[in-house]
Amino acid sequence: MARSKTGIQIPAPAVRPGERPNFDDLDIPQAGGLPQPDISADASDLKDLSFGLVRVLNHNHGAIGDWDPELSADALVSGLKSMVLTRAYDNRMLKMQRTKRLSFYMKCLGEEAVGVAGAAALRADDMLFPSYRQQGALIHRGADLVDMMCHCISNQKDNLLGRQLPIHYARKDLNWFSISGNLATQFPQAVGWSMASALKGSDALASTWIGDGSTAEGDFHSALTLASTYRAPTIMNVVNNQWAISMHQSLSAGSAATFASKAIGYGIPGIRVDGNDFLAVYAVTKWAADRARAGYGPTLIETYTYRGEAHSTSDDPSKYRPQDEWKSWPLGDPVERLKSHLIMRGDWTDAEHDDWEEECTDQVTKAWKEAISYGTLEEGPHAPVQTMFDDVFVEQPWHLRRQRQALGY
């Protein structure tokens, strides 16, 4: 943190390109140290959760403490498999972008547990309002890889007919709301959906994710006000992966000790969780979901993690942070941590893991070959031109009818 001659505070990351990664200033508490409160607890009594860090997996790969969700081996293996498949999918899609087979991509390396555990803890009828690094949640919900790829290359099988940016998936059948480029809008939209759900008499809730940089937008604060006022059954996830494109998280955090603590002023529980601990993310999400369904309102969750890759394929992180800094992240790799936990329990082996990684690579390769059989980005076929007029108005206005006729449709 620098201070100018005028006394103005100028936030800055601790290290810059060419310097040694250094996370010595981070206060990482031991696993199992925070108690799990009852879902009916008043938000004013939960402030410790905003400043601590919920952790379940310890350095010996064991699960300890009140927050241990005590998941079955099948549930944990399912989560691990989804994270490994997500990583394989990401790797393939990045290679395809670099060889100009698709225009744009964003990986979630290091953040796989955020999306997968966050989805695994919810019901199928809960609506997800994601940001652009929760592809693992979509995969865990059963999305077909071919369909996801077809969307990314905007071929004739793209379910969005070429109307969205690559990776801005939308799946009504999987209760997956369209990703918004103006990311902070996901928060108020999720709150509105959850209020509508409650008014219909349903206990289905909305869960939404934004990055740490989006908390500096007005939509973030408007959503918290709305959710607090109406006790909307919403889970509001702030993915603190340390960087908003090239801006360090200290710029959007302001002088707040944590992003979770921003919830205190709104009378909402704020919980800070180890985002690279699958069990911890699952447990906190499940607690928030149970609280929302019981009528106690929203929860703000700060998932504390690190963005391993570039912000997007249009970004060069070597310009603003040390190379491979994420490998020094003290909370480790979410895939390796869950893998080690399962091996320690006797529910998984290194050989099984290697076999699954190979199977995922084969699965992704086959999916890509099928996807381009429906058309490529360069050569098509793409969605028919006349579809640009569809699905906008129930009754098409006269000026669009005239434009359509002018094009011969």
Image (cartoon, helix red, strand yellow):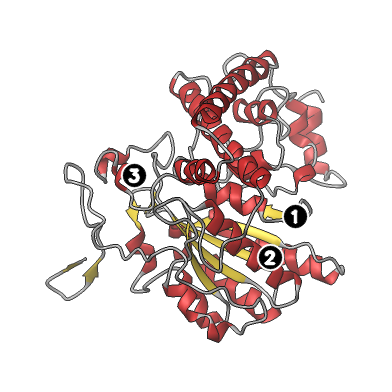
Identify the mark at residue 30; answer none if there is no mark. Answer: none
Q: In the rendered structure, which amino acid carries the disc numbered 2?
A: Ala
Q: In the rendered structure, which amino acid carries the disc numbered 1?
A: Arg
Element carrying mark 2: helix
In the rendered structure, the answer to whether residue 257 lies left or right of residue 183 reads: left
Q: Can residue 180 be seen in this view?
A: no
In the rendered structure, the answer to whether residue 139 lies left or right of residue 196 reads: left
Whole-Å distance between the Cαs marked 2 and 1?
Answer: 9 Å
Count every numbered label the image shows and give the total. Answer: 3
Q: Mark 3 or 2 closer to N-term?
A: 2
In this view, the residue farthest toward the left is 5
Assess whether mark 1 and mark 2 are in contact (beta carbons under 8 angstroms). Answer: yes
Identify the mark at residue 289; answer none if there is no mark. Answer: 2
Q: Nearer the viewer, residue 294 or 256?
A: 294
Residue 256's spot in the image, x, y percent?
37, 74
Q: Residue at x 26, y 46 (%)?
A: 320
Q: Which residue is drawn at 79% across and 31% down?
A: 404
Identify the mark at residue 326; answer none if there is no mark. Answer: 3
Q: Residue at x 61, y 46 (%)?
A: 76
Assess whether mark 2 and mark 3 are in contact (beta carbons under 8 angstroms). Answer: no
Element carrying mark 3: helix
Assess whether mark 1 and mark 3 are in contact (beta carbons under 8 angstroms). Answer: no
In this view, the residue farthest toward the front is 346
Q: Return the residue at label 1.
A: 123
Q: In this view, does 320 lie above or below 204?
A: above
Residue 316's spot in the image, x, y percent?
33, 37
